[in-house]
Image: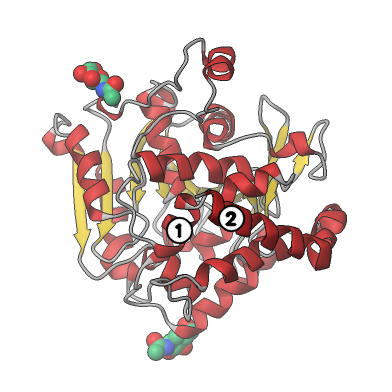
């Protein structure tokens, strides 16, 4: 391992001395946005839908952008529209839900089906880089893992939508958006504001993840080496990460001719034009610390809070020498859940999903809908040309029953 690490550090040092530094120096300026810019203007109003931009401030000071599509395309305001919060996954943002044509994108379909749609954007992504006292150029701005999304981002977004609408929420998460909700539910959070939850490409246990890219990065402590070198922001478009990817792609068994496939698994149903739309807006930054947390879970097969890998430091943060466990069996058995997973998904591996389902085995039978799509991989859930019929229509039917 020491050898692998050394070569990785050399690669990074080389990259940084070249163009890598540019990413760090100019990252702040790149993200100063016009008030007129935003997902509403860019992706929603252009399709003929009304859209509102909202700001939600978390208890630890992050200013998150949230979009609301209050009515369907017809503009008709039906009396009672139940709110739905859409939460994207890792390295993505709220545009996740707007990539397909309007009659096939989940956000628009929900609005046209009578729901009040709210789109969340995680801290650190393009439209959620504000903070009450920190700046994305500060190391402290990136001092978080998904534990903080569980403790701060998700509760802030839920509370905001609940306050605005006076109603309990339906929730849809994709990928990391499922993990943070499951973790919150297991800690008895959000439940009083939740009506039901949909989990697409569910992530909880990841010890059996097959994605060659993610597994190689975890096994070779790539995220840790970035952290040691002071790259607190994990910017997938930045030179340091791009060059690391190139290094991983040269390893035997890793075929990166199609980068998306080597990360997510073989998606069945992506129309080539949607990959272009995707690349126009994604991928987005996250905290390097977050990728370390996920790497720990991939290596150990555990589902715990961030491990400082030092008993004293864990003690300081958690009052115990090892990080606390998120125990999925404590999710209330009567919470309505719709879970859909894919047979080709390299990030949400079927064996890992089985572990999650085992911990939900006492869930009330009529409160848990499980859908298995043999042909789906990770990106199909938000980009497949047949996602409307395969997943979204059943999902909307599920919401209407709750
Ligand atoms: C791909 O998507 C575009 C835009 O929605 C559509 O016009 C085209 O027919 C699709 N192509 C295929 C092969 O599905
Ligand atoms: C989770 O909680 C259940 C009881 O609620 C307990 O039996 C089980 O050992 C716990 N699992 C972990 C990993 O702590």
Task: Answer few, some or many: residues within 10 Å of disc 2's Cα (few below 14, many 20 plus, some between 14 and 19).
Answer: many
User: How are the colours assigned in the image?
Assistant: secondary structure
- Image coordinates for residue 49, horizontal then vertical, percent: 58, 64
- Image coordinates for residue 313, horizontal then vertical, percent: 59, 19
71 vs 38, left or right, is left
In the displayed structure, would residue 329 be above or below residue 76? above
Quadrant position of residue 170: top left
**348 or 400, nearer to the observer:** 348
Figure quadrant of the C terminus: top left
Q: Residue at x 42, y 62 (%)?
A: 109
**355 or 245, nearer to the observer:** 245
Q: Residue at x 24, y 71 (%)?
A: 375
**347 or 299, nearer to the observer:** 299
Give the SS element for disc 1. helix
- Image coordinates for residue 288, horizontal then vertical, percent: 63, 45
Mark 2 sits on what residue?
Answer: 93
Residue 32 seen by the camera? no
Mark 1 sits on what residue?
Answer: 216
Mark nearer the viewer, 1 or 2: 1
In the displayed structure, would residue 98 be above or below residue 362? below
């Amino acid at each position: 391992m020491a050898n692998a690490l050394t070569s990785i550090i050399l690669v990074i040092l080389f990259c940084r001395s070249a163009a890598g530094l540019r990413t760090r120096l100019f990252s702040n300026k790149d993200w100063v946005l016009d008030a007129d810019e935003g997902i509403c203007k860019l992706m929603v109003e252009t399709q003929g839908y009304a859209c509102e931009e909202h700001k939600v401030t978390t208890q630890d000071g992050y200013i998150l952008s949230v979009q609301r599509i209050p009515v369907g395309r017809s503009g008709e305001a039906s009396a009672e529209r139940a709110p739905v919060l859409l939460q994207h996954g890792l390295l993505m943002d709220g545009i996740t839900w707007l990539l397909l044509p309007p009659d096939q994108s989940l956000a628009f379909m929900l609005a046209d089906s009578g729901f009040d749609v709210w789109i969340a954007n995680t801290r650190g992504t393009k439209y959620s880089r504000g903070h009450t006292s920190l700046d994305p150029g500060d190391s402290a701005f990136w001092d978080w893992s998904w534990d903080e999304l569980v403790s701060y981002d998700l509760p802030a977004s839920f509370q905001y939508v609940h306050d605005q609408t006076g109603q309990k929420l339906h929730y849809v998460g994709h990928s990391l958006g499922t993990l943070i909700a499951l973790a919150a539910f297991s800690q008895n959070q959000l439940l009083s504001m939740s009506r039901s939850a949909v989990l697409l490409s569910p992530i909880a246990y990841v010890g059996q993840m097959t994605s060659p890219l993610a597994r190689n990065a975890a096994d070779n402590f790539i995220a840790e080496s970035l952290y040691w070198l002071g790259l607190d922001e994990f910017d997938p478009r930045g030179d340091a990460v791009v060059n690391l990817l190139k290094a991983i792609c040269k390893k035997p068994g890793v075929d990166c001719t199609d980068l998306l496939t080597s990360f997510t698994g073989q998606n069945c149903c992506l129309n080539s034009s949607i990959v272009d739309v995707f690349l126009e807006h994604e991928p987005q930054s996250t905290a390097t610390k977050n990728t370390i947390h996920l790497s720990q879970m991939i290596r150990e097969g555990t589902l715990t809070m961030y491990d400082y890998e030092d008993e004293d430091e864990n003690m300081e943060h958690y009052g115990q020498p090892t990080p606390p466990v998120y125990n999925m069996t404590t999710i209330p058995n009567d919470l309505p859940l719709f879970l859909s997973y894919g047979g080709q998904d390299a990030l949400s591996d079927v064996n890992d999903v089985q572990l999650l389902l085992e911990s939900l085995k006492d869930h009330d039978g009529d409160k848990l809908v499980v859908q298995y799509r043999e042909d789906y991989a990770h990106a199909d859930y938000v980009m497949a040309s047949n996602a409307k019929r395969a997943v979204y229509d059943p999902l909307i039917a599920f919401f209407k029953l709750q």
